[in-house]
Amino acid sequence: DAGTQVDILARSTFLRYQEALGHVVDSIPEGYYPGDYLIVLGKELADRDGSKWSSLEESKWLPKIRSYAVNRLMKSIKDDLGLLGVEIDKYTSEHELVGSGKVEDVMKKLADKELIYKGVLERPKGKKSDDWEPRPQLLFKAKKFGDDVDRAIQKSDGSWTYFASDVAYHMDKFKRGYESMIDVWGADHGGYVQRMQAAVQAISDGKAKLDVKICQIVHLLQNGKPIRMSKRAGKFVTLADVVKAVGKDVVRFIMLSRRNDQVLEFDFDKVVAQSRENPVFYVQYAHARCCSVLRHAIEVFSEEALEPEALLLTDLSLLNDENELAVIKELASFPRVIESAAKAHEPHRLAFYLSDLAAAFHSLWNKGKDEESLRFILKSDVELTLARIALIRAIASVLAIGLGIMGIEPVREMKS
């Protein structure tokens, strides 16, 4: 919330504020934010303050409008994340980082380590760099930590680069005791990974490690066609729009069902379809089917006989059909999947696993429809039935735990 882009946000909001007061706005100036969401902000500001800011010079209204726009949009972001069940423990303001002197503090630390110097960088070849200037700047010795080139940390006019604020942010994290850090960035910031990892290594004396997860774009599809969006024209679908259309659990599962570095296609038609093509439905349906079997089993046996403690005494060696063994093998790999997903910071591994387990279970279910001997409840064979109920309980438990880790509510009955 600091720098030129936030000032542009403030000016864009002020333009919409003037428009709400009745001033004619023929066009949005080049470089301003055109989105309709700023029309709402401008109207709210006009309703709250009237013409209070309208005739003042920019230096008077810019800080106030900037603060209003940032706070208002941050509330919107927090509300949207809340719809998705995402909770952020601490929000960090770049404006506060700079104002509190934390940027200067980390620069002093780097200077004491002789890791910054005045110099002129070569012009980047084949790409634009906002940090490059053909004159001396304060530079960080990023090459010493494996980066391709040293990096500008202060411009020739004395203002800090975005990189400087990012270094201060990670220093603040390190001081709060975090030695394993995970950053989630958009694909357009991929070129910043090496320099940021170099900076974290420098400020922590190698004690902290930064893992940067680069996220690719999400394509929204409807009726088989992409929904066209334009940042320049201010036309886009928000996260809140998507959550309200299909529900929190669907969005969470789909977003976690691909590697972060792969482009994700979010097909509105598929995610509401009750078919195997819809991974959310397929996994939830498996859990609901398990619950259905358990409800039916209670009608046949006593509830006490189906408690986990009682089922531990059943003869599980009776589960010797190849389809049953396939499910058991899937269940056995669950702890390793959780461990590997956590260590690699790759939650999609869990989504893949749950889909595979659901597929194995549905296959077993379908076999039981074709072959009576493979049905879960056989009144003629109590011991085998109890063994299969134990298997069903295990499947339901693993599905519920896995979905719970993903922040998704396992359903007990599917709604038509």
Image: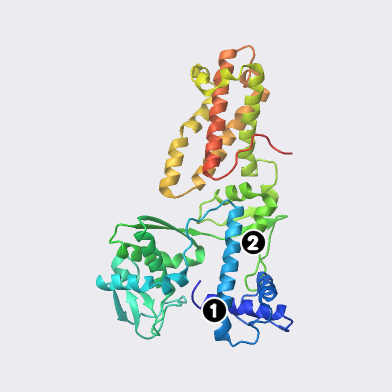
When the figure is inspected, residue 306 is found, relative to residue 142, above or below; the finding is: above
Q: Quadrant of residue 381?
A: top right
Quadrant containing the C terminus in the rendered view: top right
In the displayed structure image, the side of residue 101 where residue 266 appears, left or right = right
Residue 225 quadrant: bottom right
Relative horizontal placement of residue 24, taking residue 366 as reference (left or right): right
How many circles with numbers are drawn on the protein?
Answer: 2
Rendered location of residue 397, percent (x, y)? 54, 32
| Above or below 345: residue 176 | below
Q: Amino acid at mark 1?
A: Pro
Question: Mark 1 falls on what kind of element?
Answer: helix
Q: Which mark is residue 238?
A: 2
Estimate the spatial distance between the alpha carbons at disc 1 and disc 2, rounded to whole Å: 27 Å
- Residue 405 percent location from the top left of the image: 51, 43
Number of residues whose C-alpha sits closer than 10 Å to that of mark 1, classed few (under 14), some (14–19) or many (20 or more): few
The image quadrant that residue 281 belongs to is: top right
x and y percent of residue 133 in the render?
Answer: 41, 83
User: What amino acid is at disc 2?
Assistant: Thr
Identify the secondary structure beneath mark 2.
Answer: loop
Is residue 220 visible to us here?
no
Residue that carries the numbered disc 1 in the rendered image: 63
* Closer to us: 199 or 171: 171
Residue 14, placed above or below residue 329:
below
Residue 350: which disc? none
Q: Residue at x 48, y 30 (%)?
A: 329
Q: Is residue 38 visible?
A: yes
Identify the residue shown where x is 57% and y is 68%. Answer: 71
Residue at 61% in and 87% down: 56
The foreground one among 72 and 267 is: 72
Residue at the (53%, 39%) spot, across then down: 402
Q: Residue furthest left?
A: 113
